[in-house]
């Protein structure tokens, strides 16, 4: 399979990836393995009637989980089955108990739950899942070259729609805190310490909002419906990540030099 090209890190690498994204993405999605996966999903998902059937088919599950960035759960079949079976209409449904909203998005998207509409026979829905799978697969492959670029691509794709949702500002911040890629990006861009996630969740919310207002001039997540604001956020993330990496390497080298001199 074609591997995305990220010749260097930092802002230069991000600019290069932006400029070549369309051509690289086209080559990536035309690779034989990805074509086999998406064709199989397109041809077979309509025959699925129950979550049990769904999770029993690893190839279908690969595309479905990949479309929501949950590919690491591919072997947790019972867990995913329960997520799908319980749906999202009841507040105490399993998917609704997680701060990571991707599980609820997965369950809601397919509609296996009680009083929900099963969408596997809807061709528009199927193509939308395939589009998401291709986009996130490209992000994952990019992350194998440079993890910072994966988080940046994720934010570029996901943050605008999140900002435009008809939810409260606090609800949007809780979503950011619950989605590992977005949380990592915001923590780094806002220069929050690594142990920050260990404090009370409501205190975290207060700090996120306060720091966002200091850095971006507003605590409202709605501001990131503006693509330029998203790019400002990504720029701050990449620069801070590069500084942190340099500092870590410098510290390690300094310790090693001290030990050698000793």
Image (cartoon, helix red, strand yellow):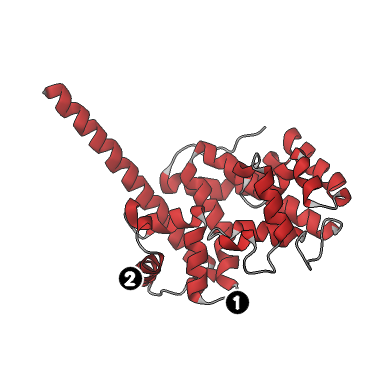
Tell which tag, 2 or 1, sits nearer the viewer: 1
Q: Is residue 25 left or right of residue 129?
A: left
Please provide percent x and percent y for residue 84.
72, 55
Residue at left offset 33%, top offset 70%: 214
Please provide percent x and percent y for residue 128.
75, 57
Q: Is residue 69 left or right of residue 218?
A: right
Q: Considering the numbered disc 1 on the image, is that residue within a helix, a strand or a loop?
A: loop
For residue 66, say whether it is visible.
no
The N terminus - image quarter: top right
Q: Residue 104's image quarter?
A: bottom right
Please provide percent x and percent y for residue 70.
62, 48
For residue 105, say whether it is visible.
yes
Cα distance between the residues tagged 2 and 1:
25 Å
Which of these two is toward me, 218 or 172?
172
Which of these two is toward me, 203 or 234?
203
Q: Residue 232's image quarter?
A: bottom left
Q: Is residue 11 left or right of residue 48?
A: left
Residue at left offset 36%, top offset 60%: 190
Residue 166 is marked as 1
Q: Which residue is mark 2?
A: 214
In the rendered image, the residue lying farthest to the front is 92
Label 1: few (<14), some or many (≥20) within 10 Å?
Answer: few
Label 2: few (<14), some or many (≥20) within 10 Å?
Answer: few
Please provide percent x and percent y for residue 140.
58, 43
Determine contact: label 2, label 1, CB under 8 Å. no
The tag earlier along the polypeptide, 2 or 1, is 1
Q: Considering the numbered disc 2 on the image, is that residue within a helix, a strand or a loop?
A: helix
């Amino acid at each position: 399979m074609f591997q995305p090209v990220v010749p260097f890190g930092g802002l230069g690498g991000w600019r290069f990836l932006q400029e070549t994204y369309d051509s690289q993405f086209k080559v990536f999605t035309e690779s034989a393995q990805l074509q086999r996966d998406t064709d199989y999903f397109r041809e077979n998902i309509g025959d699925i009637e129950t979550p049990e059937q769904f999770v029993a088919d690893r190839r279908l599950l690969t595309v479905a989980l990949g479309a929501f960035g949950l590919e690491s759960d591919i072997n947790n079949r019972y867990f995913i089955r329960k997520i799908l079976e319980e749906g999202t209409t009841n507040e105490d449904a399993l998917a609704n108990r997680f701060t990571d909203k991707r599980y609820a998005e997965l369950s809601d998207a397919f509609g296996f739950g009680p009083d929900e509409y099963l969408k596997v026979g809807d061709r528009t829905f199927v193509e939308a899942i395939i589009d998401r799978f291709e986009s996130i697969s490209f992000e994952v492959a990019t992350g194998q070259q440079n993890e910072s670029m994966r988080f940046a691509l994720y934010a570029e794709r996901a943050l605008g729609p999140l900002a435009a949702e008809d939810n409260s500002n606090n609800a949007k911040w809780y979503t950011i805190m619950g989605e590992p890629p977005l949380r990592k990006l915001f923590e780094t861009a806002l220069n929050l310490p690594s142990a920050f996630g260990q404090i009370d969740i409501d205190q975290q919310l207060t700090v996120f909002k306060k720091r966002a207002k200091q850095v971006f001039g507003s605590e409202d997540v709605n501001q990131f419906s503006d693509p330029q604001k998203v790019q400002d956020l990504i720029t701050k993330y990449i620069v801070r990540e590069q500084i942190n990496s340099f500092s870590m390497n410098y510290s390690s080298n300094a310790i090693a030099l001290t030990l050698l001199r000793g």
